Image (tube, rainbow, N blue to C red):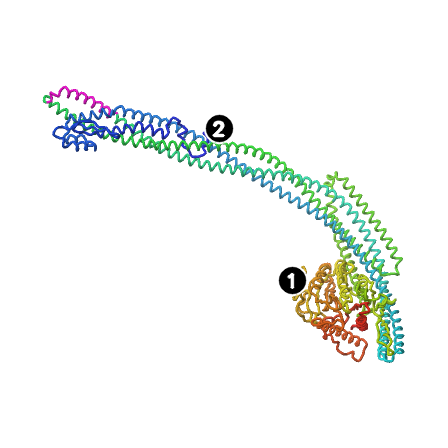
């Protein structure tokens, strides 16, 4: 506003702005010092008139003194009189001191003439009057300015109150908009949750359909696997027959070999007798095997007849069930097609709702942005309003202070004006009296001059004159006192005027600052008003848009609710039809699985199987046709998207269908129970097939022998190739895959001829040439590893001299093709266990141990205690050495506990490889003359397998549980002390190694004696003679299955050690556990 007083920036005096004509403090003091103080000084000098006897006038630099002549006869008192006059004595005091009337009058006249009192005092009075008029004008202008300031402040307060009211209204609207936005967000979240739920339901339906298809495929694959297993069992039986024929040939060869030994040397009669006993044992074993083979054939024939009968009874039932299921599946497909079309339409509606919801989300996001902008503007307005309020409070406080000071100044000015008025009146009277007195004194002086000679005559007149002089003296004294009072009051007035001037200047500066602040507040207020108008415009637009969006959201919410209701009803119908379809598919899957299993087991019903396969193909063609029809219906449903309104009108019809579907639910449930029963029966048959497979597998393994021996010859090393002639290798491979010949140098003849070369022939279950790779070797033992997963104790150990390839056979080298028995066995176990878990509901818990027997002490290669092995198989701080010696305990149930040895849960081959790497780093090895890195301990890897079959509901099912232990042993190398030239610790280690291997040989010999039925059959088997044999006791007794790999070197330099190893292996080959 143009008439508004500018706002001050600091506290100022308002009076300085209102009157520029009022003099400043310095000018006022200078003017006052040039006028008033001079008059005051002259009046004071006039009061200090000194009357002396010589009547001379003396003026000093500071005052004026009159020294009248003292009357005669009174010279001695002149000094006192002057001192009295200087000290301000009264008229009576001077008269009493001897001053005559004429002298006093002359003294006064001289003083008045010198003082020129009337002109100076009038000038002072005129100046005071002018100052009084200036102060009155200043007060009037100040009052006007204060009125303007008060009016401007009231107007500003009124405008601030209105702004505050508008701000409160704006804040309330913003809060309402925020609530509306929150409501929209909640509705948006609800819509999104509904859409997500619909998508989840859709995905669940698709997953259920895929799961049913997968179950059907799994059942077919299981039936195919059972067929393959039965074929493999037949192949095993054929191989067993071939092995029996080979065994007969071996018996004949053994007889020929015994006769040749009897003819060649009489010293070997004892050996011939033992060979004859062995032949007799082999014949007995052959007879037993023949009997067992006959029993096996009889059981196989009975099983085949049972399967034939079951197949003949089951095939008609399965065909009837399949026909009914095919019809039900057709009905379900038709219902599914209708529901698919409805679902497609609803999907389109949901897509439209999603689009609308996305638009609403965009608008909501825009509104959120505007709300945030409005909130920022609101915060800025709040800050401006707070600063304005603060400035207003400061201005109000300043104005209150100015008002108080102005009131005080006004009161002081009023008092000063009253005092000045009274003083002016008194001065006027005194001036008049002084004028009259001056005139009288002039007249009296003239009369005195003319009538000096007439003094005597005028005594009466002198008396009167003395009386008048006395009165005049009193009046003069009164005027002097009054003059002094007026001087005092004038000094006080000057001081007050100076103080008031300072206050007026201060108030003027404060008023200027207040005006500057008011100007700034006015500018801020105008800015706030402009921003408020902008915010109001935006708010109006936001309100309009929010109202529009609210209407749209309400409309969309109604449509979504209607669509959700319809979709829920259609989903219920679709779920019911899908359940029917799922039950039908499950029943069909179970029927086909049972039919396929029957076809795979029955070789005599090949023609019926062909016809059933033809029917299955026709059904598949029908299903394909139905699928094409479904696709066509889906495409038609997409084309008919424009008929959504018609779908809404047909809701009643779908409700009726839903009611009909509910009535059919009981019958479908009964069918589902029947199908579930059929499925459980099929699962039971599959489980029985698995048990039969395990029994047959175990029977085959027992027929092959619970203790088997494989021989493996390693290739010549580069150093051996340089020293040995490849054509004169000590080992000779025969045409048979189970024989091996060793050529050794015999003793010299009696005639002094050279040593005769001897040929030793050994027969084992399998002999591997140096060119055999790791994969071929594992193929031969894979069936034995499977027995561990079937719940048997299995032990595979490698035996042979140092450097013969035991560790390579068991552990292997770098690269997948060089993997040894341990990693390949574990990979097979993990793979087959995972398959059983997925297909037959088995659950397996596997734990691994890695031990070494060093110097007849059992030590843990994974840690001294169980807690030292971390979950990630990382090595602990003390992982550079094996733990302390551990104890071995066997219980009555065949469980073995090895002290505090770590049992590490394992689930894949990578974990086992980490354990093997750690164990290899901690295993005791040393360099010998035979091998640069020779194993100085026996390493045992134990895998404890526990499994149980679970039912579909997570219970134990039929309570089938298994427990097997797989022991994979890498024995230390057997060696001759004379050849290794071991000393110190190596000598002690070699002695313990040979002792434990000798104990192993004694145990095997005792077991062989028991098996042969000799007189020592009841003798105790010395398992406790060595920690190694005591640890392997469960693997060498009972129904355990043991495989020994004898590793030999083809080098002629190692022929003696090779001969010892082969003889030891031949002894083991004669052992059979009980």
Q: Is residue 920 above or below residue 442?
A: below
Residue 411, image x and y in percent? Answer: 34, 32
Residue 100 located within the stretch drawn in magenta: no
- Residue farthest toward the left in the current orientation of the protein: 456
Q: Would residue 1071 be seen by someone viewing this image from the given angle? A: no
Return the x and y of residue 889 as percentages of the image width and height: 69, 72
Q: Label 2, on which residue?
A: 1
SS type, badge 1? loop
**Quadrant hosting residue 636:** top right
> What predominant SS class does the magenta segment belong to?
helix
- First-in-chain label (2 vs 1): 2
Q: Give the residue at mark 1.
A: 876
Instruction: For label 1, count other residues whose C-alpha is less than 10 Å away and answer few (under 14), some (14-19) or many (20+).
Output: few
- Note whether 610 is above or below 806 in the view shown: above
Find residue 18 and report its image quarter.
Answer: top left
Of tags 2 and 1, which is closer to the observer? 1
Is residue 727 at least partly visible in the picture?
yes
Left or right of 167, for residue 923: right
At mark 2, the secondary structure is loop
Residue 450 inside the magenta-drawn segment: yes
Residue 379 location (% of width, % of height):
54, 39
Separation of marks 2 and 1 at Cα, in angstroms: 86 Å
How packed mark 2 is, by other alpha carbons closer than 10 Å (few <14, some 14-19, many 20 or more), is few
Vertical position of residue 471 compared to residue 606: above or below: above
Magenta stretch: give its range: 428-455
Residue 208's spot in the image, x, y percent?
A: 74, 51
Q: Nearer the viewer, residue 506 or 45?
A: 45
Front-lying residue, 384 or 836: 384
């Amino acid at each position: 506003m143009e008439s508004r007083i500018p706002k001050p920036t600091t506290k100022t005096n308002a009076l300085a702005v209102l009157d520029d004509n009022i003099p400043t403090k310095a000018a006022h003091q200078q003017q006052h010092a040039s006028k008033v103080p001079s008059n005051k000084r002259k009046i004071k000098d006039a009061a200090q008139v000194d009357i002396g006897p010589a009547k001379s006038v003396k003026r000093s630099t500071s005052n004026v003194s009159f020294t009248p002549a003292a009357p005669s006869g009174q010279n001695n008192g002149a000094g006192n009189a002057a001192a009295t006059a200087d000290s301000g004595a009264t008229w009576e005091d001077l008269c009493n001191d001897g001053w005559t009337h004429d002298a006093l009058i002359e003294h006064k006249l001289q003083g008045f003439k010198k003082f020129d009192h009337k002109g100076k005092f009038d000038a002072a009075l005129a100046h005071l009057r002018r100052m009084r008029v200036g102060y009155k004008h200043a007060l009037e202008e100040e009052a006007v300015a204060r009125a303007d300031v008060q009016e401007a402040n009231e107007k500003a307060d009124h405008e601030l109150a209105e702004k505050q009211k508008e701000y409160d209204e704006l804040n309330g609207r913003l809060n309402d908009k925020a609530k509306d936005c929150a409501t929209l967000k909640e509705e948006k979240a609800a819509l999104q949750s509904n859409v997500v739920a619909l998508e989840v339901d859709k995905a669940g339906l698709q997953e259920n359909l895929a799961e049913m298809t997968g179950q059907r495929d799994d059942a077919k694959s299981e039936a195919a696997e059972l067929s393959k297993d039965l074929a493999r069992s037949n192949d095993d039986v054929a191989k067993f027959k071939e092995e029996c024929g080979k065994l007969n040939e071996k018996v004949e060869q053994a007889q020929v070999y015994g006769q040749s030994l009897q003819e060649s040397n009489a010293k070997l009669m004892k050996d011939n007798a033992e060979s004859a006993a062995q032949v007799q044992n082999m014949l007995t074993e052959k007879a037993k095997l023949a009997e067992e083979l006959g029993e096996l054939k009889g059981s196989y024939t009975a099983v085949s007849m049972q399967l034939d009968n079951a197949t003949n009874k089951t095939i008609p039932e399965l065909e009837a069930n399949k026909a009914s299921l095919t019809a039900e599946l057709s009905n379900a497909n038709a219902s599914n097609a209708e529901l698919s079309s409805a679902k497609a339409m609803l999907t389109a509606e949901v897509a439209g709702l999603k689009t609308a919801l996305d638009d609403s989300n965009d608008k909501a996001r825009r509104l959120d942005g505007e709300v945030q902008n409005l909130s920022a503007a609101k915060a800025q307005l709040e800050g401006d309003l707070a600063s304005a309020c603060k400035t207003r409070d400061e201005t109000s406080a300043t104005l209150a202070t100015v008002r108080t000071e102005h009131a005080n100044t006004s009161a002081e000015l009023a008092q000063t004006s009253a005092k000045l008025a009274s003083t002016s009146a008194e001065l006027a009277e005194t001036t008049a009296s002084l004028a009259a007195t001056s005139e009288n004194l002039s007249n009296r002086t003239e009369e005195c001059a003319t009538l000096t000679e007439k003094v005597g005559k005028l005594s009466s007149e002198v008396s009167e004159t003395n009386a008048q002089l006395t009165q005049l003296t009193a009046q003069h004294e009164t005027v002097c006192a009054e003059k002094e009072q007026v001087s005092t009051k004038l000094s006080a007035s000057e001081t007050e005027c100076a103080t008031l001037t300072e206050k007026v200047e201060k108030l003027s500066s404060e008023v200027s600052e207040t005006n500057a602040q008011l100007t700034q507040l006015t500018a801020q207020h105008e800015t706030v008003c402009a921003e408020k108008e902008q915010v109001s415009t935006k708010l109006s637009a936001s309100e309009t848009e929010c109202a529009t969006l609210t209407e749209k959201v309400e409309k969309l919410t109604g449509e979504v609710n209607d669509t959700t209701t319809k979709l829920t009803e259609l989903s219920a119908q679709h779920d019911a039809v899908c359940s029917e379809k799922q039950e039908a598919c499950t029943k069909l899957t179970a029927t086909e699985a049972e039919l396929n299993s029957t076809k795979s087991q029955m070789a005599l019903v090949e023609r019926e199987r062909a016809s059933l396969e033809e029917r299955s193909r026709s059904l598949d063609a029908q299903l394909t046709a139905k699928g094409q029809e479904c696709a066509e219906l889906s495409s038609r449903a997409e084309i008919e998207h424009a008929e959504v309104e018609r779908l809404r009108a047909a809701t009643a019809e779908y409700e009726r269908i839903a009611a009909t579907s509910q009535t059919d639910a009981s019958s479908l449930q009964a069918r589902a129970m029947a199908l579930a029963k059929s499925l459980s029966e099929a699962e039971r048959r599959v489980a029985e097939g698995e048990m039969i497979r395990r029994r047959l597998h175990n029977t085959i393994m027992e027929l092959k022998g619970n203790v088997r021996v494989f021989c493996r010859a390693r290739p010549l090393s580069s150093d051996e190739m340089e020293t040995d002639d490849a054509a004169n290798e000590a080992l000779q491979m025969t045409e048979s895959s189970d024989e091996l010949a060793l050529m050794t140098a015999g003793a010299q003849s009696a005639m002094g001829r050279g040593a005769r070369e001897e040929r030793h022939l050994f027969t084992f279950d399998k002999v591997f040439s140096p060119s055999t790779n790791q994969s071929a070797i594992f193929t031969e033992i894979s069936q034995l590893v499977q027995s561990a997963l079937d719940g048997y104790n299995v032990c595979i150990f490698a035996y042979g001299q140092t450097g013969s390839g035991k560790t390579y056979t068991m552990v292997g080298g770098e690269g997948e093709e060089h993997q040894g028995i341990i990693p390949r066995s574990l990979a097979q176990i993990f793979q087959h266990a995972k398959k059983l878990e997925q297909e037959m509901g088995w659950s397996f818990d596997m734990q691994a141990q890695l031990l070494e027997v060093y110097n007849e002490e059992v030590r843990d290669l994974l840690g001294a205690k169980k807690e030292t092995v971390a979950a990630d198989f990382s090595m602990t701080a003390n992982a550079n050495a094996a733990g302390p010696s551990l104890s071995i305990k066997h219980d009555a149930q065949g469980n073995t506990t090895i002290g505090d040895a770590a049992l590490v849960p394992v689930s894949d081959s990578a974990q086992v490889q980490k354990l093997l790497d750690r164990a290899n780093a901690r295993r005791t090895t040393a360099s010998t003359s035979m091998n640069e890195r020779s194993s100085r301990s026996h390493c045992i890897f134990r895998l404890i397998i526990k499994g149980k079959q679970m039912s579909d509901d997570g219970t134990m099912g039929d309570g089938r549980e298994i427990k097997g232990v797989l022991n994979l042993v890498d024995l230390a190398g057997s060696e001759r002390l004379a050849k290794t030239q071991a000393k110190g610790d190596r000598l002690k280690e070699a002695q313990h190694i040979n002792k434990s291997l000798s104990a192993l040989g004694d145990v095997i010999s005792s077991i062989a004696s028991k098996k042969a039925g000799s007189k020592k059959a009841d003798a105790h088997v010395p398992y406790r003679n060595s920690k190694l044999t005591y640890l392997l006791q469960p693997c060498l007794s009972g129904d355990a299955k043991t495989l020994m790999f004898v590793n030999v070197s083809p080098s002629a330099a190692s022929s003696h050690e090779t001969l010892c190893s082969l003889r030891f292996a031949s002894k083991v080959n004669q052992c059979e556990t009980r």
